[in-house]
Every structure is written in C-alpha cells, then in structure tokens.
C-alpha cells in the first residue's frame, strides 16, 4: 500500500496561510512530519494560494530541501503540473488525468515527457457516473488510451471516486465493487482519498479508517491520506498484517517497538 | 451482523471465580452489560467451573433473571448442552457441532429437539485443516448432513476457524477465502471469534478490530466478541454503515447521539 501524504494542500486553511505568507518553515515541517509518518509520496496542491504556478515551484523546492520523498503534483492545470514535474527531482506522480477531453489532452503529453506515475479518475465530461458499471467503463476507456500511448500500466492508479454515504447509502458498496472489478478486468492498480465517503456525517475519522481497511481488503494499492494520524496508520499496518502483506510481521512489530501503534 | 457476547466464559479467570463462589451478582452484571452493549446472543461456557452441568443450569437461570437476550450454549458435552437448552427460554444457539464423529452424533439430536441455531466448525477428527480448500470441503460435508437431517440452513453459522497469524502469515487470507467461498458455494452464514488471529502478537485489539472489519466486508454474518468494548462496537457500526447495512444511517447516528462511538 502506497501512502500519499495529503497535508500539503492549499485547501487546508493553515497551509493556504503558509503559502500566502511564504512561511517556508511551516511547509518544511509538514513535509518532514508526513515523511516520518511513512508517506511514500507527498501530494502538493497550490490551487488556492496567490499564484498557483509560482506557489507550486516554491513548495516543491521547499519540500525537497528537507525530504527526498517523491512528490505527487496535484493540479487541474497542465501548466502548473509541468512546473511541478520540472522542479521535482527523482520519480513523480501526476494527480490527475481523467476522460474529460481537455484534461486528457493537457495531461497525456506530460505523463510521457516526465515518465511519471499518474492517478486516473473514472470520470468524463459528464461528471462522475453514479453506477459502478459506468465508472468501470470509463476505466476501460482510459486503459485503451494508455495502451495506445504506450504508457506503462504499472504506473497508473485508478481512482473510482467514492461519493458520500450521506448522499446514497450504497456509495461505499459501489466503490468497493469498482476496486475489485478494475483489478479483475484490467489488472489495474487503484487509489482513493479517504474522507469524501464520510462527508456530513459525525465521527468522520472512524468511518474513514474502516473505509481504508475495507478498501485494502478489496486490493486497493494506494491511499491519499494523513500519515500523521497514528490511528489510521495503525489500522493500515494491522490490515497489511492481516492480508499477508507484511513479511514476518516485520512492519507491525517495528511499529509496535517504536510506539507507533495506537490500540 | 449478529453479536454473540463472549464474556460469560469460564476460561476468563474472574468469571470462573464467580462460578466457583456462586457470585450471582457478578454473573448478572456481565449479562446486563453485554446486553446494553448490543449483544444479540450471550455465549455461556462453564467448562472450567466446579461442575460443568450444574454451573450451566445456574448461569442460565441467573442470566435469564435479568436479561431476555437469547443464549448460546457453549460446551463440547451433549449432556451439558442439553441442560443449557432445557433451562433456556425462547430461542437458543448451540456452540458447537463439527464433522468430528462423536460431536456430530451427540449434538445432532439436540439441534432437532430444541430447534436451535447452531455454530458449525469446519473441522473433523483430523483436526482443523490448514488449507481453505479442506475447510470448505468439510463445510460441504456439514451441509449434506444438515440437509439429510432437515435442519434449516438459515439457522446454521459456519465457523471456518481462524488460526493465528503468528503461526502462518497467510492464516488471515485463508480464513477470508473460507468466508467468501462458504457464502458463494452454499449460501451459508458464517461466524468467527476475533481473538485467535492475533495470538502471541502485541496490541491484539488493534488486529482483532481490523480483522472484524475485513471479515464483515467478506460477508460474515455473526461474531463472537466483547460487546462491552466500545472501540470494537464502534468499528462494527461504522462498517455496517459502509457496507450499506444500516438503513438511513440510523444505527450509526443513534450510537453517535448516545455517545457510544469511539473515534
């Protein structure tokens, strides 16, 4: 399971504040803490700062001064993504592409030019389909595009875009079916954020944590999450153990010995 | 998901003590607390007291003075089970039958006579098979027995007997496969205890809790567990919500409002 650290996102007020004030220490600290929490990638989103493209360059540079965790460049703008991928050293991920015509056209050349991993959303110009069947159809269309463009499927993470339970109580089940089917039909890797599912319900972290465990049991390969939340990282480590993805219980016991497991 | 409360078990030192001392208030208190925690059945095991059969009668009577939760009579002895089923009012469950010849012969008549639900262990006189395939084969043999004896499959809960991860890191995966396959092949209901999986590992409750969530996502119908552990009942309630088994989020919101959800 890849952990993509979600905290360097300008949608979070304190992060936006730090971007506006060029508070480089705040940014560096968030990068270091997420790396220490086990992040395999750090997502960087600067959409809500002063200048998205300048902020992207500034944050990427700041982060790379303190950690060497690969970066996940998160923007709907191909220009901003290009700036991020240019500035980032080592391997990178692009967040995200989809079957929306403009996004597809803007992002495809960047994936090839920078040979990055990519998050592929199962949506098109009609939005996010309500049914699993339709989202799986879009995943199939994306698979065709990636094949045609010679993009390595090992680098693609499909996000079937979970919708809130509060909108439709079947939205979790629909999402779990997408995870299983994208694996079965396309041998595709999958990814998700964890918070959308619990939107407008109380005790959201409890829901998000169990959502992660169920997603992992359906074979999910990566999660966009908070690596500083020890309750959720503890659930993740225990789930890997249960799914036989932790050889000799090594990670579990290591986390236990370093007091990182929250019971 | 049926919750079978596990606490009235003479393997627990304080419970054994209460049985030896005929401390009826202790027994009643444990029954009331488990009922308040949402138990659908209360397991009663008196194997390690003074006289298993007398203690069974005494505990069943004591419990029924304070709660009307159905009882799950837990013994390897058909005589003790008979005493429990005789004494218990209302619907009951028998814990357990298996393909062991003597146990099968001793318990089958009781299931028919008392029309109780039953936990069916996927083991025979050779013990618990290591592989999923062999345990599923035994489940199939039990299905044949139940059909032949006209026992209603709706009342049968198969327990595929999880073995500790510390013995074989694949033991969780083997168990999850059993849950899915017993459902797929026989439309059989399933049940499990939650603690065996984590035997001799640290922070066992963390493992047990995530084990429950994964089991539920594989369609498990019942768990033998501690209904007084609010962390595990919170995980259960959130998982039911995620799996669309909580109409209008009613149970989740009710638990939230009564401060029963631990985040």
Image: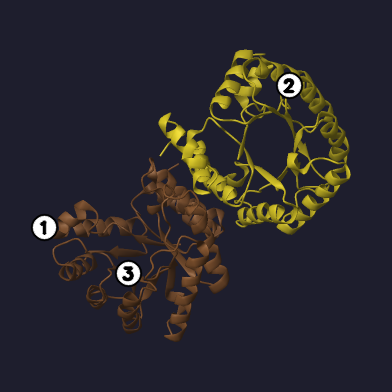
Chain colours: A yellow, B brown
Which residue is drawn at the image coordinates 62% and 26% (left, top)?
Answer: A13
Task: Mark 1 vs mark 2: tell me if same chain.
Answer: no
Position above or below: B32 against A56: below
Does the residue at mark 1 contact the one at mark 2 (Cβ under 8 Å)?
A: no
Residue B171 picture location, percent across and down? 47, 54
Looking at the image, the residue that sits furthest to the front is B126
Closer to the N terminus: mark 3 or mark 1?
Answer: 1
User: Label 2: chain?
Assistant: A
Instruction: From the viewer's side, name the closer residue of B15 and A134.
Output: B15
**Which callout, 3 or 1, points to the residue nearer the camera?**
1
Q: Does any portion of residue B216 appear in the rendered image?
A: no
Residue A254 in the image, given as x and y percentages of width and height: 46, 33
Q: Which residue is mark 1?
A: B21
Q: Is residue A168 above or below residue B166?
A: below
Q: Residues within 10 Å of mark 1 (few under 14, many from 20)?
A: few
Q: Residue at x 74, y 59 (%)?
A: A133
Q: Residue shown at 47%/76% (left/top)?
A: B141
**Label 2: how many Cα within 10 Å (few below 14, some 14–19, many 20+):** some
Callout 2 secondary element:
loop
| Element type where label 1 sits in the image | loop
Q: CA distance from mark 1 to mark 2?
A: 71 Å
Task: Sort mark 3 into few (<14), some (14-19) or many (20+) by Cα contacts within 10 Å.
Answer: many
Pair 2/3: label in front: 2
Q: Which residue is mark 3?
A: B70
- Chain to which the residue tagged by mark 1 belongs: B
Q: Which residue in the protein does label 2 denote?
A: A89
Q: Are marks 2 and 3 on the same chain?
A: no
Viewer-closest of B15 and A255? A255
Q: Residue furthest left?
A: B21
Picture quadrant of residue B193: bottom left
């Amino acid at each position: 399971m890849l952990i993509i650290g979600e905290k360097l996102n300008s949608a979070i007020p304190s992060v936006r504040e730090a971007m506006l004030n060029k508070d480089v220490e705040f940014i560096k600290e968030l990068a270091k803490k997420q790396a220490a929490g086990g992040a395999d990638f750090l997502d960087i989103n600067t959409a809500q700062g002063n200048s998205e493209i300048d902020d992207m360059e500034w944050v990427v540079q700041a982060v790379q001064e303190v950690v060497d965790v690969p970066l996940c460049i998160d923007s709907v703008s191909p220009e901003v993504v290009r700036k991020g991928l240019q500035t980032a050293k080592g391997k990178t991920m692009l967040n995200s592409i989809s079957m929306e015509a403009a996004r597809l056209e803007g992002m495809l050349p960047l994936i090839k030019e920078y040979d990055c991993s990519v998050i592929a959303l199962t949506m098109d110009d009609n939005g996010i389909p309500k049914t699993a069947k339709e989202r799986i159809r879009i995943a199939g269309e994306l698979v065709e595009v990636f094949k045609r463009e010679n993009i390595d499927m090992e680098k693609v993470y499909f996000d079937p875009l979970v919708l809130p339970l509060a909108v439709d109580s079947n939205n979790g089940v629909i999402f779990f079916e997408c995870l299983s089917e994208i694996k079965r039909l396309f041998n595709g890797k999958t990814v998700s954020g964890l918070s959308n599912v619990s939107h407008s319900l109380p005790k959201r972290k409890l829901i998000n944590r169990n959502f992660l465990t169920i997603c992992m049991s359906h074979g999910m390969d990566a999660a966009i999450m908070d690596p500083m939340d020890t309750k959720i990282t503890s659930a993740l480590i225990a789930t890997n153990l249960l799914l036989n993805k932790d050889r000799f219980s090594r990670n579990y016991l290591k986390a236990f010995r370093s007091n990182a497991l929250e019971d």
